[in-house]
């Protein structure tokens, strides 16, 4: 048996792991690299030969876990792509959105290069086209949570709820070859306990090998103030300043959570009435997917629906789909809330809104999710005095805020608690999905507190498993 680490090693994005066991080659996730220093990897030929893969398994629908699947299909993969039913619906939205954003960004860059008279070594073009997404969608297959899927006579896969976003999964791979049976757990992204809308992550009492996320593995979420109270305070302060609240949003889960909280705050009269613009066609489509998969909701969300309350609609919410609608709000004066993708400000309409408003002192830029190193969002959050957007250097005069405790990721204590359900030490834990120093810190923490063998693999490293 072999396990190769093809992404999300000593960095957060680009999730991709190749497991070879009992004659089967499984690829767990095929995600896009989003950190600036690693983005060139997206354009390199796949490190696995697509024609030799037997199955692709997707933990969930975030682009750093599924965003390179159409490229794999473009290069010749024709096998099944297996995930949960909710994830399958979301994956289609994510990939279509990614293809559109790439086309828009490539067109914008070409125009800018022509205007600047710049000579470029390589032509600017999208990673893949919509036809590649169409083929990818046709290859999607679904499995229910806790359903055993037979890969061959000796290998099975099971999806368990990860509590991260709608449809997210911890993937369990069981190998029953000639030797002793082995159980692999690929956590994907693990959610926090007691989050709105989605259920809590499932736990396990036994595993031989764990590929473990560590996004917040070196710290705990600040929870001194309730998320809803934080949001109330930030919005009131921004309204007093008379400016817009620009929220870089993740279209899946985070957008729905923020809508959920805004709905409650406005309904209770705790924040001033103001327009709330959801400038993300994809987030609007995701809302519909949520409505179609209520079987994934936690009890609180189900109780709210039973009481006749809408989770994702309220009078102040205006959904913008076209570019023309998006551009019109550039001229909007006065307090308003603008939620737009992408969540790390790496692409999409959010960059246009930031370009329009980040130099205005009355603006508040509110981050509601993790900002990977090297992304525009991380540069702003780290306090850079100026940032480069669409080829222009812009001063950052806006007020910068961040919601604490809202993350879709478990923190260090949450990850440790999840591992602590294992009643016997795994043979090895591979710590991934974290900045290098964070992964190293969490691996050390696991060794010292749980006395489990935890290591941080290198990019492209191959580990032989006995």
Image (cartoon, helix red, strand yellow):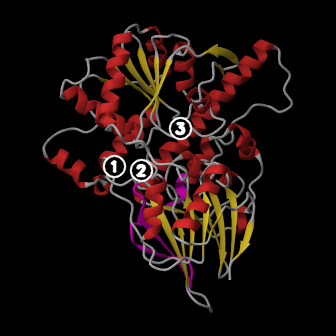
Picture quarter with the C terminus = bottom right
In the image shown, does 8 or 149 lie closer to the viewer?
8
- Looking at the rendered structure, the secondary structure element under dot 2 is loop
Gap between marks 2 and 3, in whole Å?
A: 18 Å
Q: Is residue 425 left or right of residue 15?
A: left
Tell me which residue sits at (55%, 13%) in the image. Answer: 397
From the top left corner, tell me how far across and down residue 450 is, in percent: 51, 70
Q: For the magenta stretch, what is the residue range?
A: 137-163
Tell me which residue sits at (58%, 67%) in the image. Answer: 447
* Extreme residue in the front direction: 448
Q: Which residue is mark 3?
A: 97
Q: Which mark is residue 165?
A: 2
- Looking at the rendered structure, the secondary structure element under dot 3 is helix
Q: Is 161 one of the magenta-colored residues?
A: yes
Mark positioned earlier in the residue sequence (1 or 3): 3
* Extreme residue in the left direction: 307
From the top left corner, tell me how far across and down residue 432 is, in percent: 61, 58
From the top left corner, tell me how far across and down residue 313 is, in percent: 26, 32
Mark positioned earlier in the residue sequence (2 or 3): 3
Any part of residue 70 in sight:
no
């Amino acid at each position: 048996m072999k396990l190769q680490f093809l992404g999300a090693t000593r960095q957060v994005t680009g999730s991709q792991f190749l497991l070879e066991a009992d004659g089967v080659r499984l690829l767990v996730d095929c995600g896009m690299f989003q950190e600036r220093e690693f983005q060139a990897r997206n354009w390199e030929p796949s490190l696995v030969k697509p024609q030799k893969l037997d199955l692709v398994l997707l933990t969930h629908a975030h682009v750093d876990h599924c965003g390179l699947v159409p490229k794999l299909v473009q290069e010749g993969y024709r096998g099944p792509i297996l995930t949960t039913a909710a994830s399958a619906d979301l994956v289609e939205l994510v990939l279509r959105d990614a293809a559109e954003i790439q086309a828009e960004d490539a067109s914008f860059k070409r125009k800018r290069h022509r205007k600047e008279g710049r000579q470029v070594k390589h032509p600017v073009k999208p990673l893949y086209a919509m036809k590649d997404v169409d083929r990818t969608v046709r290859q999607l297959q679904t499995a229910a949570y806790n359903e055993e899927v037979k890969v061959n006579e000796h290998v099975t896969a099971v999806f368990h709820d990860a509590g991260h976003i709608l449809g997210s999964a911890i993937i369990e791979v069981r190998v029953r070859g000639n030797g002793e049976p082995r159980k692999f757990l690929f956590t994907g992204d693990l959610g926090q306990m007691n989050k709105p809308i989605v259920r809590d992550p499932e736990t396990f009492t036994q595993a031989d090998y764990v590929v473990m996320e560590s996004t917040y593995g070196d710290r705990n979420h600040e929870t001194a103030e309730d998320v809803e109270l934080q949001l109330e305070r930030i919005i009131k302060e921004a309204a007093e300043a008379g400016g817009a609240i620009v929220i870089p949003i993740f279209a899946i889960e985070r957008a729905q959570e923020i809508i959920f909280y805004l709905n409650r705050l406005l309904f209770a009269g705790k924040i001033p009435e103001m327009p709330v613009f959801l400038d993300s066609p994809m987030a609007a489509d995701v809302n519909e997917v949520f409505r179609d998969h209520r079987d994934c909701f936690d009890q609180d969300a189900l109780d709210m629906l039973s009481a006749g309350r809408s989770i994702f609609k309220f009078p102040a919410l205006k959904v913008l789909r076209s570019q023309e609608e998006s551009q019109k709000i550039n001229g909007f004066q006065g307090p308003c809330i603008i939620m737009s993708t992408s969540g790390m400000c790496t692409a999409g309409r959010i960059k246009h809104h930031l370009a329009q408003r980040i130099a205005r002192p009355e603006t508040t830029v509110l981050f509601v999710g993790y900002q990977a190193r090297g992304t525009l969002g991380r540069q702003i959050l780290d306090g850079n005095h100026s940032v480069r957007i669409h080829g222009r250097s812009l001063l950052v005069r806006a007020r910068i805020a961040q919601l604490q405790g809202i993350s879709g990721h478990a923190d260090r204590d949450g990850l440790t608690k999840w591992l602590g359900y294992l009643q016997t030490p795994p043979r090895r834990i591979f710590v991934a999905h974290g900045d290098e120093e964070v992964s190293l810190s969490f691996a050390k923490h696991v060794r010292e507190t749980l006395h489990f063998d935890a290591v941080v693999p290198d990019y492209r490293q191959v580990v032989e498993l006995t």
